[in-house]
């Protein structure tokens, strides 16, 4: 199944708003992710949005590839020097053993439930042995669109742990919370750090 066109259209239209929202916030999970990576590690920011996190990782000395399916987000991400940017959907990820880490921060929640396991397998294949995955997701059940029209797929923490395990990724750290995103709707979320076994 190709990337959801309605979701991409929202990000194309609201790219600058999303950039402002991210720029005004700090993400403690990013520091934890970077601390667990070797010096000079190569990382993929999968669903990079405007490249805010990719730029922070580059500034910390990591070699960064950033990808997004939204052309407007890709244009914003290319403004960050030192970051390789790809206009690419999750389904187009085809790297093999290329990355020490993958940062998938609240991006894969737009993948249909029927395609999610395959996305995790592609990420596992793209990681080097012992590679690290950061996965941020909203929690719940089912699929639905938010008030902006973006497609969301929801999982329980237990479901995510099982899916990661099936893909050969062992969870090392879990953080839960709740918050509002671009649509203003508050929802519970989880971030999981998992390592390729």
Image (cartoon, rainbow, N blue to C red):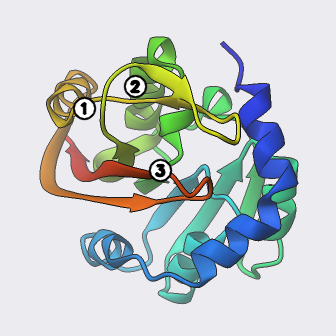
Q: Are marks 2 and 3 in contact (CB under 8 Å)?
A: no
Residue carrying label 1: 160
What residue is rendered at 30% in x and 32% in y? Answer: 140
* Residue 83 spot, x, y in % from top left: 69, 71
Q: Can residue 48 be seen by looking at this rendering?
A: yes
What residue is rendered at 61% in x and 82% in y? Answer: 23
**Disc 2 or 3, which lies upstream in sequence?**
3
**169 displayed left or right of 8:** left
> Label 2, label 1: how many angstroms apart (C-alpha)?
13 Å
> Label 3, label 1: how many angstroms apart (C-alpha)?
13 Å
Q: Quadrant of residue 37?
A: bottom left
Q: Nearer the viewer, mark 2 or mark 3?
A: 3
Above/below status of 168 relative to 172: above
Q: Are marks 2 and 1 in contact (CB under 8 Å)?
A: no
**Disc 2 or 1, which lies upstream in sequence?**
2
Which label was assigned to residue 121? 2
Mark 2: which secondary structure? helix
Q: Quadrant of the C terminus?
A: top left
What residue is rendered at 59% in x and 37% in y? Answer: 146
Q: Residues within 10 Å of mark 2 (few under 14, many from 20)?
A: some
Residue carrying label 3: 106
Q: How many marks?
A: 3
Mark 1: which secondary structure? helix
Which label was assigned to residue 68? none
């Amino acid at each position: 199944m190709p990337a959801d066109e309605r979701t991409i259209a929202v990000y194309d239209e609201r790219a600058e708003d999303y950039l402002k929202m991210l720029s005004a916030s700090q993400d403690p999970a990013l520091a934890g992710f970077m601390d667990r990576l070797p010096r000079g590690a190569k990382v993929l920011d999968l669903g990079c949005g405007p490249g805010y996190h990719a730029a922070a990782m580059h500034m910390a000395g990591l070699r960064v590839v950033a990808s997004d399916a939204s052309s407007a987000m890709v244009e914003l991400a290319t403004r960050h020097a030192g970051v390789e940017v790809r206009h690419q959907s999750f389904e187009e990820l085809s790297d093999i053993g290329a990355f020490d880490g993958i940062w998938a921060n609240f991006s894969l929640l737009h993948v249909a439930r029927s395609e999610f396991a395959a996305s995790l397998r592609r990420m596992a294949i793209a990681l080097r042995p012992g590679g690290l995955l950061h996965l941020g997701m909203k929690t719940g059940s089912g699929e639905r669109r938010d008030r902006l029209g973006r497609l969301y797929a929801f999982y329980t923490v237990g479901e995510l742990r099982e899916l990661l395990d099936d893909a050969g990724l062992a969870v090392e750290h879990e953080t839960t919370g709740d918050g509002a995103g671009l649509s203003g709707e508050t929802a519970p979320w989880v971030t999981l750090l998992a390592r390729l076994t």
